[in-house]
């Protein structure tokens, strides 16, 4: 276990005071920490984290769906970073290449679906999404068409920069910043739980594709640059695709000349038990966005993977993608990502997820016996539990109830009980569980034990609520994004 460090600060109290005075946390109600202590994480090992008071937590969220190899590889990755620092601490990918970016691009291309040979590096997920939309627009321009619009899905999260936020389908985080980049529309996501009883998988797929085609036609097919979808949508709670869905989207994109981008910022690099969700579901996109797991979040590096078809016009005489980021392909970050992939291969992390995913699901399944747990969905090491007020009617919670349950009760109680996971109310209320990809049965058991205990308490709390509810939950506040 690594030794927790409090750097130059003498005490937990001083660290917390300094954080309160100077460090602005992301998507965080900072005022809350006047009343309760701000969590300060100082160490990590395996799937666990340690806070400044010495308390241990199971990280059931892999540091925002990112730390594939867990927290024990700092030494080895640090050596790779230090070696790169000695060799070449920085150079840019604007006009110049350097060995680590070249090697990483080749490595990523070798793991990607066939026909993806080109990799454009970014500093994170939102930049990958921005880069995808921009390359889609310019690709069409190079082919003599003016297409600019994007289509995303309801409640999907794609990042917070203005372009990525415009594509994001979560109203409450869009509203404060409007007007956004215009002319993005959102279509139905693959939430199956709230569909009518008796609807078949085929009918569900047909309904979704019908909705998408209507949107394409109403927007004007020749104005749409890109459709962007996650293989499994995180926000709203691990919405998996019904059979035939992605093949249908591919067919619509082909019919109307639209580029198809798979946002694999979460699903890329093993989370679903394949290197990419596009491989698992045979999605055949034109673009793939990635970040988090590329380096197991040991570095802030992302990548846009570009299919040969899309890359082709940019490699013509006197052409360039008119887009760049100073830190894109940073040599130290590339060295870290390369070492991460080496470790993932050595430990056969992706094979491990593939082999253990059924055991993970089976361990979580008994939670469905709790009256408050309406649905368990997901795949790989990527699951969500949807919480309901009444299981038979699938009745949800009002905004006030959802806020009380998720923000005031569950988030705090889970954390107190030693489990970091996400109580999320961007759609219906869900608990998201997404551990490091090295998690084993002992970790599944620990996680499920804590969830069971806390959700049993939550059930008792819900019993005290009035029978009505579920009216305006979507307007509720957000907990952390990602
Ligand atoms: C699907 C998806 N796309 C994009 C992003 C944005 O990534 P980042 O926070 O690295 O900008 C996220 C973040 O969680 C995401 O889940």
Image: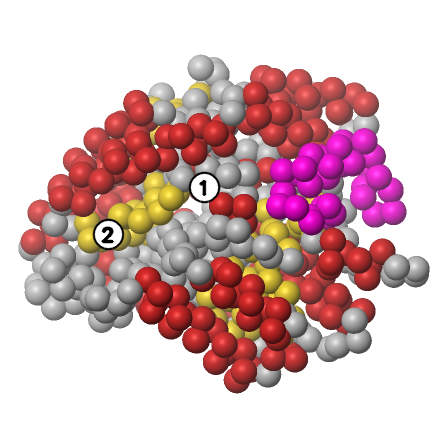
Mark 2: secondary structure: strand
Question: Which quadrant holds residue 464?
Answer: bottom left
Query: Can you identify the residue that label 2 sits on?
Result: 375
Q: Does the segment drawn in magenta span residue 114?
A: yes
Near mark 2 (Cα within 10 A), the count class, few <14, some 14-19 or many ≥20, is: some
**Camera-nearest residue between 190 and 293:** 190
Residue in the picture at 51% in, 61% down: 247
Q: Does the segment drawn in magenta span residue 319?
A: no
Residue in the picture at 73% in, 46% down: 117
Question: Which quadrant holds residue 276?
Answer: top right
Q: How many marks?
A: 2
**Camera-nearest residue between 304 and 113:** 113
> Residue reaching furthest right?
317
Tell me, yes or no, whether the two marked residues, 1 and 2, touch with CB atoms within 8 Å: no
Residue in the picture at 29% in, 44% down: 411
**Camera-nearest residue between 279 and 391:** 279
Q: Which label belongs to residue 272?
A: 1
Residue in the picture at 40% in, 57% down: 243
Query: Where is residue 99 shown, x and y percent of the image?
Result: 81, 31
């Amino acid at each position: 276990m690594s030794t927790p460090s409090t750097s130059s600060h003498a005490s937990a109290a001083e660290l917390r005071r300094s954080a309160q005075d100077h460090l602005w946390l992301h998507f965080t109600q900072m005022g809350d920490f006047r009343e309760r202590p701000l969590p300060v994480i100082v160490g990590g090992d395996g799937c666990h984290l340690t806070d400044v008071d010495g308390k241990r937590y199971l990280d059931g969220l892999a540091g925002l769906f990112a730390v594939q190899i867990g927290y024990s590889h700092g030494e080895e990755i640090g050596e790779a970073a230090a070696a790169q620092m000695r060799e070449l601490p920085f150079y840019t990918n604007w006009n110049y290449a350097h060995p680590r970016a070249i090697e990483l691009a080749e490595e990523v291309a070798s793991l990607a679906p066939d026909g993806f040979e080109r990799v454009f590096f970014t500093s994170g997920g939102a930049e990958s999404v921005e880069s995808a939309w921009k390359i889609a627009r310019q690709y069409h321009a190079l082919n003599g068409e003016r297409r600019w619009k994007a289509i995303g899905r309801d409640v999907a999260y794609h990042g917070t920069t203005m372009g990525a936020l415009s594509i994001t389908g979560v109203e409450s985080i869009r509203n404060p910043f409007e007007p956004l980049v215009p002319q993005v529309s959102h279509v139905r996501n693959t939430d199956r739980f709230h569909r009518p009883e008796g609807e078949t998988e085929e009918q569900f797929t047909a309904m979704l594709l019908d909705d998408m085609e209507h949107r394409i036609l109403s927007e004007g097919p020749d104005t749409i640059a890109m459709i962007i979808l996650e293989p499994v949508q995180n926000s709203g709670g691990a919405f998996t695709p019904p059979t035939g869905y992605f093949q249908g989207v591919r067919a619509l994109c082909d019919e109307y000349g639209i580029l198809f981008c798979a946002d694999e910022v979460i699903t890329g690099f093993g989370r679903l038990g394949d290197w990419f969700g596009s491989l698992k579901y045979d999605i055949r996109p034109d673009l793939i966005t990635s970040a988090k797991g590329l380096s197991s979040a040991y570095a802030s590096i992302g990548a846009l993977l570009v299919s040969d078809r899309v890359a082709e016009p940019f490699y013509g005489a006197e052409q360039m993608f008119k887009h760049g980021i100073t830190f894109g392909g940073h040599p130290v970050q590339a060295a870290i990502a390369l070492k991460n992939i080496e470790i993932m291969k050595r430990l056969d992390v992706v094979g491990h997820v593939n082999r253990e995913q059924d055991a993970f699901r089976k361990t979580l399944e008994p939670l469905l016996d709790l009256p408050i747990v309406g649905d368990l969905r997901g795949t790989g090491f990527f699951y969500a539990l949807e919480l309901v007020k009444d299981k038979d009617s699938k009745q949800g919670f009002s905004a006030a109830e959802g806020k009380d349950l998720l923000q005031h009760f569950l988030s705090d109680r889970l954390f107190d009980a030693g489990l970091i996971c996400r109580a999320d109310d961007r759609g219906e209320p869900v608990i998201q569980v997404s551990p490091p990809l090295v998690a084993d049965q002992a970790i599944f058991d620990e996680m499920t034990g804590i969830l069971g205990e806390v959700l049993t308490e939550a059930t008792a709390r819900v019993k005290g609520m009035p029978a009505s509810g579920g009216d305006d939950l979507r307007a509720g506040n957000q907990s952390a994004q990602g």
